[in-house]
Amino acid sequence: TPQGRMMVFIMDPTRAPFADAGRPTDDELRAATRGFLAYGGRYEVDEAGGYVLHYLDMEPSPNRVGITLKRFFSFTQHNGVERLILRAADLPPGVVDYAITWERLPDVRS
């Protein structure tokens, strides 16, 4: 937002539905959680450094509320499609690269 707030929701579209929507099993709940990522908070952009900081104040894991995520950014454009690529600054052990590509949708407002 113009006020410096952001939110992200990423869902695996292949998550299996609960056998009984009103009474999911513990295994079903764990699987559903693994297939859904969300967080939000304030952000700051450092254009000279090429990174953005996300200050999390909303996150499903209580242990992650209050942390700061650093993401290096780059922009690409191909065939008129704009993309923002965010790469994690701090990678977990064994992870070589972690990037998320966001694609700008055309403005469909009437």
Image (cartoon, rainbow, N blue to C red):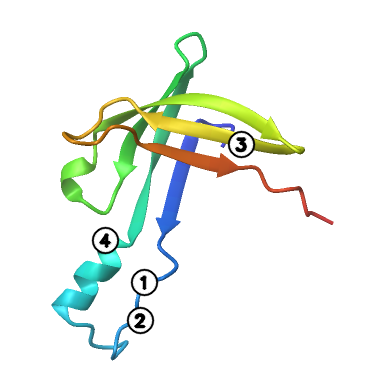
Label 4 SS:
helix
Q: Position of residue 13 (x, y in %)?
A: 45, 67
Q: Are marks 1 and 2 in contact (CB under 8 Å)?
A: yes
Tell me the quadrant of the picture where the C terminus can be found: bottom right
Q: Position of residue 47 (x, y in %)?
A: 52, 14
Number of other residues with Cα within 10 Å of mark 1, as a class: few under 14, some 14 to 19, many 20 or more: some
Query: Taking 44 as reference, is 46 above or below it?
Result: above
Q: Looking at the image, which residue sits at the far bottom?
A: 20
Label 2 SS:
loop
Q: Which mark is residue 34?
A: 4
Q: Which mark is residue 15?
A: 1
Q: Which residue is mark 3?
A: 83
Q: Quadrant of residue 99?
A: top left
Q: Are marks 4 and 2 in contact (CB under 8 Å)?
A: no
Please name the amino acid that badge 1 sits on. Answer: Arg
Q: Earlier in the sequence, mark 3 or mark 1?
A: 1
Give the spatial CA distance, label 3 vs label 1: 26 Å
Number of other residues with Cα within 10 Å of mark 2, as a class: few under 14, some 14 to 19, many 20 or more: few
Q: Which mark is residue 17?
A: 2
Give the spatial CA distance, label 1 vs label 2: 6 Å
Please name the amino acid that badge 3 sits on. Answer: Arg
Q: Earlier in the sequence, mark 3 or mark 2?
A: 2
Residue 54 or residue 89, whichever sits in front: 89
